[in-house]
Amino acid sequence: MTQDGVRPIRLDGLAYGGDYNPDQWPEETWAEDARLMREAGVNLVSLPVFSWPLLEPREGEYDFAWLDRVVDLLWSQGIRVDLATATATPPAWLVRAHPEVLPVDRNGVRLEFGSRQAYCPSSPVFREHALRLTDAMARRYGDHEALALWHVSNEYGDHVARCWCPESAAHFRRWLQARYGTLDGLNDAWGTSCWGQHYTEWAHIEPPRCATGPINPTQQLDFERFSSDALLELFRAEVDVLREITPNIPVTTNFMSLFRELDYWDFAAAEDVVTDDAYPDPADPAAHVGAALNYGLMRSLKGGQPWLLLEQAPSAVSWRDVNVPKAPGQMRAMSLHAVAHGSDGVMFFQWRQARFGPEKFHSAMLGHRGTASRSYRETAALGRELSALSAVKGTRVRSAVALVVDWDAWWGLSAPDSLPSVRLDWATQARGWHAALFALGQTVDVVRATGPFDAYEIVVVPNLYAMTDEQADALAAYVRGGGTLVVGPFSGVVDHTEKVHDGGAPGPLRALLGVAVDEWWPLPDDAHETLRSGGRAWRAHTWGEWLEVSGDADVVATYGSGDLAGRPAVVRRADGGTAWYLSAVLDHDGLVALFRDVLRGAGVPATPGTTDDVEVVTRTDGATDVTFLLNHGRRTVRLSDLPADSRVLTGPPPADGHVTLGPFDVTVLTHPTTDRPPAVRILTTLTDEKGPSA
């Protein structure tokens, strides 16, 4: 463990490899796998994620001999292991002996064994058996030289994030008692005087199952919080076992990017290394934009520390309706994209492509054709290339802009009943705001609503529906200290118990923003309105608000059509720094125009035009920068105005002061650290294959 409490992964250079399932193959294949892994540059594999039934074929009877041989074989080739506790799915013998461990859906239907994650997170029986296996794994392999990282369970919440069984109900009641202390406290928090829901016994409280009509929104919000906490409690229980037996080995569990079901701020606090499973759709020409936000979250969860891309597909996945493969060069671009955004390695699912099961059509590093497969040729080439990027390990991504992500706001805004409009979606808002900043050349970090914000010149809050005084105080202090804040619609509406703030929205931010919301004004489906700012017109949809503006705030834009025509729509107020409030949902072009004004006002350079396919991201150790020039598109681009004293680490080199990148091409430069990241000083000229087109 280092002095700052971080347990580093025991690995030289960037991590490279993927999931390995040797139990799906005859033992004579293992030696070939290890040899080919070494030839492909693999230095880390994840195993045995789903092998509980083989490790413990009967209760209390363990068989580690086969796994011993696999781990020893890999280590003989210099390959370390990300060793899973194998608790992702209970074996059939456990489920049949204790059917109560199976989860129940909100309709009261108990889900059957036959897929993954067939367990209730609150089940004491499941927890007892899982912790016993974790203990056995830690004692068996804790001292093995190959062990680089503990991998607890797998993708928590992917298949079962919520359970409504009697055991979960009892756990929920215990969670509520710890949160509120008394029934009076709960009744007050839940507002149970509405619709005759007052509780006189804890035993009368159930999870929010299907009911006769709309369900108490605070009960729903608390069940979301509880369900995330129940899985977190399960995760922490395994972590505690591992840290007691192997205190110097780092622990992780693989996240799933910007995932609604679990509060990753809390999960990240319980682990040493953030890891992510990322599957941008190769058929989506804008997939890299969403991936950039996902990666911004991953590197921000532990204060900017590097993270690890633990899974991605070498080519096609197996679970979309149409599983499009990655075009030549696209896998390399997507992999280096993650490294650019702070990943200290590139991992895949999986090493050898399965011959059976639900994932037999999921691509692998070693495809069905073996070394003749395109995926093997491309992934082996990437493994060799990553060795040239070892200098990037441990460096941090440079960013001037941060976006607030808050799970309470996300959960509250996604309640199915009783909102002014169910069309105002938290994730859509967040991704839309990020996409506009991406188009202006900004690399965006992610922050909690309580900060810290001091590393950023601009903080944006697409939506903070549920807002506490602590969050409002932190945001206000940031502005009064000179920062620039942008807050989106329907923010500051309720407190942490879903009660509307006294005086209405934006609640405790009214004074800072200089606005009061008198009435919500959602738009019907397919309706659009116009906002006007000077001589500019911005297109709005989904949402509007009747604003009352204080005398010391400036109206930047007004509604130009509809019932709100002439009323304020965008307001800016100075208070040490600058606070903006946007009351409408703008389309992409409108958001780009607004954020260009915000960036200009904050003194943060933006690209002269907009960039959809070209991205420039910089990592630094404080003295040396590593800048990634990425072309995510299918047209050739020319980049100019490169950082001074640059040296190429990989990719097409500069010629005559320019770098030309073909479709899905990447160049990585290293240069002395500059005052600002060089992203916005690189000009782009789009060309087709025949020559310049712009």
Image (tube, helix red, strand yellow):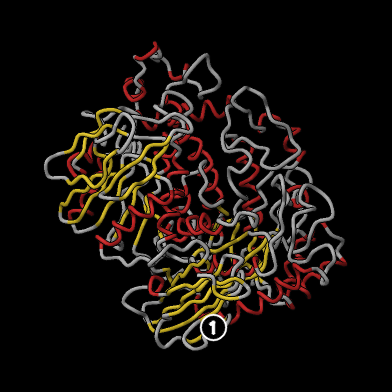
Q: Please tell me how many numbered marks the rendered image carries.
A: 1
| Residue at image coords 58%, 76% | 691
Quick check: can you spot residue 144?
no
- In the picture shown, does residue 626 fall above or below 631? below
Place of residue 5 in the rendered image (x, y in percent of width and height, measured from the top left): 41, 65
Q: Give coordinates of residue 247: x percent, y percent.
A: 51, 62
Rendered location of residue 24, percent (x, y)? 82, 56
Residue lying at the far left of the rendered structure: 551
**10 Å neighbourhood of mark 1: few (<14), some, or many (≥20)?**
many
Residue 158 position, x and y percent, is 61, 43
Quarter of image, res 517: top left
Q: Examine the rendering and report whether any part of residue 61 can be seen.
A: yes
* Amino acid residing under circle 1: Leu
Residue 314 versus residue 638 in the image, above or below: above
- The quadrant holding residue 593 is bottom left
Residue at 40% in and 31% down:
523
Residue placed most toward the observer, 500 or 419? 419
**Closest to the observer, 682 or 145:** 682
At mark 1, the secondary structure is: strand
Horizontally, residue 125 falls left or right of residue 367, namely left
Above or below, 119 against 485 in this view is: above
Q: Return the residue at label 1.
A: 649
